[in-house]
Amino acid sequence: MPSRKRSATVRRNTQETQIRLTLVVDGKGSANVKTGIPFLDHMLVSLAKHGLFDLNLSAQGDLHVDIHHTNEDAGIVLGQAFTQALGSKQGIRRFGFFSVPMDEALVRASLDFSGRPSFLVLKNRGVKFSRLETYSFHDATEFLRAFTIQAKANLTVEVVNGEDSHHIIEATFKAVAKALDMATQVDERVKGIPSTKGVL
């Protein structure tokens, strides 16, 4: 276990959203999430559960307009929380990858806390997206893009197969959760910062 508690509290107040988030990296997978977007709440609870993080997030946004600002800003504060909680990233594994099947869907996530933000989505040509009334794969990618930028990470999501958007999105969040869990773990064999540069 790390010598210090890896946690963070982040607040974001704009004319569009008011968000408060607390994160404990070395948690037990408990979550209390209220964004006003039920499907996003479901995904973030799943992220915490499978990443073994403790997450509390409350958000009030301009949902009378649409979900865009609340969805994106939730990703921003989560990324900022990971950046704060991991600090210098000393001793972490840094890299994480995971493949999650969910019925007909298969999604892979590859993550590097490189300090250089980059987000990429790869979709096989055979992938089809069914319609969801309240949340879409595009919404999920916008959340993850905002998260990745603020977490200063490199994240590639590959949708290998799928037809049901619910399954594809849920497999995506679970794959990212497991990749985050792997990448943030402290490895006793890692001495100092896991980079030949000496800084991440």
Image (spheres, helix red, strand yellow):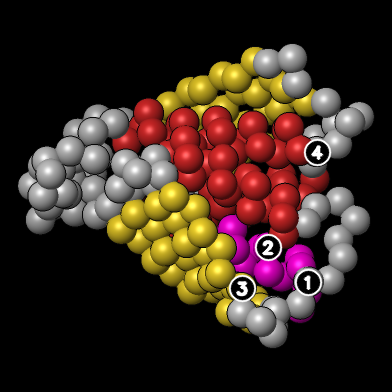
Seen in the picture, residue 75 relative to 176 is either above or below; the reply is above
Q: Residue at x 48, y 40 (%)?
A: 149
Taking the image as shown, residue 121 lies to the left or right of residue 68, namely: left
Q: Earlier in the sequence, mark 4 or mark 1?
A: 4
Highlighted magenta segment, given as a residue range? 163-175
- Distance between the alpha carbons at the discs numbered 3 and 1: 11 Å
Circle 4: element type: loop
- The residue that disc 3 covers is 123
Viewer-nearest residue: 180 or 27: 180
Taking the image as shown, residue 138 lies to the left or right of residue 114, namely: right
Secondary structure mostly taken by the magenta-highlighted segment of the chain:
helix
Q: Residues within 10 Å of mark 2 (few under 14, many from 20)?
A: many
Viewer-nearest residue: 27 or 138: 138
- Distance between the alpha carbons at the discs numbered 3 and 4: 24 Å
Label pair 1/2, CB-CB below 8 angstroms: no
Q: Amino acid at mark 2?
A: Ile
- The residue that disc 2 covers is 169
Circle 2: element type: helix
- The residue that disc 4 covers is 67
- The residue that disc 1 covers is 129
Residue 168 sits inside the magenta stretch: yes
Q: Amino acid at mark 1?
A: Phe
Label pair 3/1, CB-CB below 8 angstroms: no
Q: Earlier in the sequence, mark 3 or mark 2?
A: 3
- Distance between the alpha carbons at the discs numbered 3 and 2: 13 Å
Circle 3: element type: strand
Circle 1: element type: loop
Q: Position of residue 96 (x, y in %)?
A: 35, 61
